[in-house]
Image (cartoon, rainbow, N blue to C red):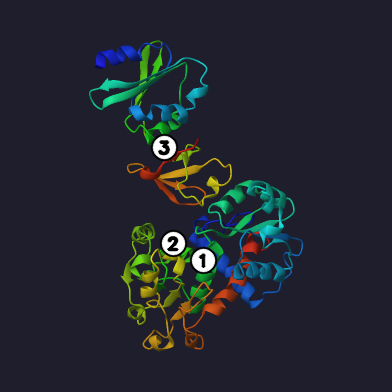
Amino acid sequence: MSNLKGRNLISITDFTKEEYIQVLDIAEEFEKNPKQPILSDKVVATLFFEPSTRTRLSFESAANQLGARIIGFSDPGATSVQKGETLHDTITMVASYADLIVMRNPREGSSRYASEVSNVPVINAGDGANQHPTQCMLDLYSIRKTQGTLDNLNIALVGDLKYGRTVHSLVQAMCNFNATFHLVSPTELKLPSSVKASIKEAGLKYYQYTDLQEIIPTADIIYMTRVQRERFADPMEYERVKDSCILTGSMLQGCKENMKILHPLPRVNEITTDVDKTPYAYYFQQAQNGVYVRQALMAAILGARE
Amino acid sequence: MDTKKELVVSAIENGTVIDHIPTTAVYQVIRILGLENHEDEVLIGYNLESKKFGKKGIIKIKNKFFDHDDINKIALVAPFASIITIKNFNVVEKIQAEIPNHIDNIVKCMNPKCITNSEVIPTSFDVVDKENIKLKCHYCEKFTTKENIKFCE
């Protein structure tokens, strides 16, 4: 078993397969008993340089339930960042106030840089379009919890597969578990060839579709994402394809019994609300699992759990 | 030609000769190796005739020797360069430049959203494809390729 104390989590590739599983096992324990004051002597700084509802609240709820104190900001406009302070100086200062830094920053690579500047561990809560590793870990947790395993699953990824960082990270992570990938997207938003290359390198298979209905009978997991208007240079093109990746209740006939629908949220219209009451909808529990996974990460990195 | 080249090479007593540099890349090589700050003699030639390349550049640096890792950085702009080490007027080593596995603080990241383009941070890349020149940014993890390489100022 690895000792995760003092480690940074910046990119999904920073942890080994065994280390993900170790964190998921700890998260299971927190799911059974989430309120444990094991970090009551710790200060966690949450630095959100851009707005985030779910991720920030999830981290802060996780830290609170473990008894940690929280400092930080959710609006850099009210801080010295607005006065032109460099990230280097902000991080150096905050590292002297806290035992752990959780950071979201729109500039890509900022979390890796922060981890090199900081003398306390850094968890990346999203650096632009680059990485959001705790989202990936809560996705893995949700998959394992609903399927009883991470191995040999049919994973369907739907929507914006080109720009969706959660999709790229999930593919990278699931390549460790002999998954078969079913990729459903408009032609303009296909999975980038570099990510497909990592599937091939792992010796695994992927299939591409433009019609969501085709994957319903095969999928163990349907991972939905939002198709954003701003991704299209041509607004007409957006109008043409925008409804091609919408999942409705009536489409679910003939799906596997164990199938679960995940979504990193926020949802707009890509899953109609009639799906919410079906036994296949799992996206809200998925968001709740984020708290347990973040508790596990903070506890392991701060040395309170192995 | 070869005889003449040998004469040029042996003209410094001790130091390094970098031959077969594309004429257009001579000043980039100087910058990459920091030769602007070298205190001893540096002789620079370009638009010299070359049977192999048509025109070429050459740089001779007196009393300066390089680690292979350092000198290999020039392979980004001069992939066919020869690096010749001279001691007591004799060629003691001649190697071909080879792109190293890691490149620090030479190339800019092509991603405008990368932190290295908004704060003063030395860039850092892993070379993931030496043949086609594909560099992965240590920070933003995006790829910079041969077509969009720009050098740090």
Same chain under badges 3 and 1? The reply is no
Residue type (three-letter) at the residue carrying disc 2: Gln
Kindly check if marks 1 and 2 are in contact, taking CB atoms under 8 A apart as contact.
yes
Residue at the image point whose x is 40% and y is 12% from the top? B12
Separation (CA) of disc 3 from disc 1 = 33 Å
The answer to whether residue B45 shows anywhere in this view is: yes
Q: Nearer the viewer, residue A198 or B152?
A: B152
Q: Report the residue marked by disc 1.
A: A136
Query: Upstream in the sequence, badge 1 or badge 2?
Result: 1
Q: Is residue A74 above or below residue B104?
A: below
Residue type (three-letter) at the residue carrying disc 1: Cys
| Subunit ID for the residue under disc 1 | A
Q: Is residue A4 above or below residue B23?
A: below
Looking at the rendering, in which quadrant would you find the N terminus of chain A?
bottom right
Looking at the rendering, in which quadrant would you find the C terminus of chain A?
bottom right
Residue type (three-letter) at the residue carrying disc 3: Pro
Q: Report the residue marked by disc 2.
A: A172
Same chain under badges 3 and 2? The reply is no
Q: Report the residue marked by disc 3.
A: B100
Query: Element under label 1?
Result: helix
Q: Nearer the viewer, residue B148 or A265?
A: B148
Query: Element under label 3?
Result: loop
Q: Quadrant of residue A185?
A: bottom left
Same chain under badges 1 and 2? The reply is yes
| Subunit ID for the residue under disc 3 | B
Q: Position of residue A172 (x, y in %)?
A: 44, 62
Query: Few, some or many C-alpha atoms within 10 Å of disc 3 (few <14, some 14-19, many ≥20)?
Result: some
Position of A33 with respect to A261 (left or right) is: right
Q: Residue furthest left?
A: B51
